[in-house]
Image (cartoon, coloured by chain):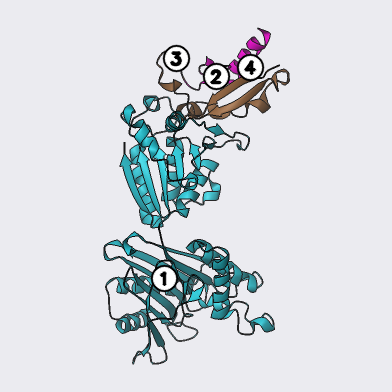
Amino acid sequence: MKKLQLEICCGTTCYMLGANRLLNIENEMPSELRGKCEVKALPCMGLCNDKELAGAPYVKLNGIVIENATAEKIYDKIRELLEA
Amino acid sequence: MYSQLFVEMEHFQFTKTGQAACGDDIQMKVLKGENRYLAVLSDGLGSGVKAHVLANMTTTMALRYLQSNMDTLQSVETIMDSLPVCEVRKISYATFSMVDLRLGGITRIVEMGNPQYIQLRGNKEIQPLKHETIVSSRWPERQVECYELKMEPGDRLIVCSDGVTQSGLGEGPQYRFGWRRSGEMEYAQERIKGNPDISSYALARSIAYKAYGISKNTCKDDITCMVIYMRKPRVMRLLTGPPYHKDHDAIFAGHADLGEEHTIICGGTTANILERITGKSVEIDISKLRPGDKLPPVGRLPGVAMATEGILTLTRVCQALENSEPVETLPAAGRKIIEMMLQHDKIEFIVGTKVNEAHQDPSLPQDLELRRGVIRRISAALNQKFRKETEITFF
């Protein structure tokens, strides 16, 4: 099965507001989710200036934006996509 | 021809084993307007703090006299008269070498008691144009050697304390008289042959380490080596921040053309501009992250040395330069930027001035300065503390 693409924004705002704690997410995932994602860091997605969005840090899972991203939110989204 | 040259003056030293302070001292000064480069190395009598005070007094006075073009004999006499008298030896003493390098003109070297300097053009030793020995009537036992020489582009001057030339003294038949000036020169020639572009710092460090090694990795005396290298400047560019006007992006990105080894991109949006214009993408390696790293990871972008985050990284670089922090203690991005800056002579900053509104969010946990302010501070620190030439262009 093709791995899900998880992209973590490493721009200034995202990094300071929590992306730094997400960079090691691959090793911290619950065992059933490990190996299901390919994790990548990106320079800046430019989402921090989008007033429509809820706030940094931002990650994208298979292109879907997760706002105010936390590890738990990411795990939930991975589960959702895996079940779909 | 000379106006485009850079004079790289660096040194490396080891403190005598068991001492808290180095008894050798070095001071350097660049008088840009006069195209003069001054350097003084002094070896204080004895070792430790007392020797350091003598050496530091000597370098401070000598540098000031050089700067004001004071007569050589008068300078030397004033220095000798001013030094405190050693309780043990009943003499006031600090040996020294004074270098007054003039771009395109005559370079003068005055030595008292220090090993003779070495001038190398590639691997070849160059003899001085003129050499004269003067003796002060007040200090008749001291000889002052005065040399005049011509420094050509690519030439190196090596000046050291006797801790270098006397290293290994008594360590077997090979070093009955120590490493000596001839040994030091042969070693320098060998190093230059292996790496004709070797930097002043690398050569000074290598010579000092060799002297240390010859003494079986202990220092029986303070070891100091200074190298002055006159060469074409090594230029690097740091691009940071998106331009204020979006239609200037292409011209801005065009400045990243100095070659892979000489360009850094600092900033996510800046990297995006480069990606868009060059069609290449940034790849960030997160496998080498250390837990608790305070700076975002470094990215690779073909055509430049590295792509890093912007303002956090630059602020950290600025603090480290201003406080002379050891680079080894910094996260990778900060360390790599500073190492690259120190390997170059001229640093050109290409700075986009568009403000990222998201950085003004009060919920951000740290103060974020405006980019141009941080760059001005980095530029000042590089100028003043590291004698680097800098240039800032705003977009």
Q: Chain of mark 3?
A: A
Q: Chain of mark 2?
A: A
Secondary structure at badge 4 equals helix
Residue placed at 43% from the left, 27% from the top? Answer: B364
Q: Is residue B360 left or right of residue B213?
A: left
Residue A70's place in the image compared with B193, above or below, is above
Mark closest to the chain's N terminus, 3 or 2: 3
Distance from the alpha carbon under mark 1 to that under mark 4: 63 Å
Farthest residue to the top: give it: A84
Residue B394's place in the image compared with B89, above or below, is above
Could you classify mark 2 by the number of other residues whose Cα lies within 10 Å: few (under 14), some (14-19), or many (20 or more)? some
Mark closest to the chain's N terminus, 4 or 2: 2
Secondary structure at badge 2 equals strand
Secondary structure at badge 3 equals loop
The residue singled out by tag 3 in the image is A53
Q: Nearer the viewer, mark 4 or mark 2?
A: 2
Contact? badges 2 and 1 (CB < 8 Å): no
Q: Chain of mark 4?
A: A
Circle on res. B56: 1
Range shown magenta: A56-84
Residues indicated by labels 3 and 1 sit on the same polypeptide chain: no
Mark closest to the chain's N terminus, 4 or 3: 3
The residue singled out by tag 4 in the image is A75
Drawing shade for chain B:
cyan
Distance from the alpha carbon under mark 2 to that under mark 1: 59 Å
Q: Picture coordinates of residue B40 (x, y %)?
A: 40, 72
The residue singled out by tag 2 in the image is A60
Distance from the alpha carbon under mark 3 to that under mark 1: 61 Å
Which quarter of the rendering shows the N terminus of chain B?
A: bottom left
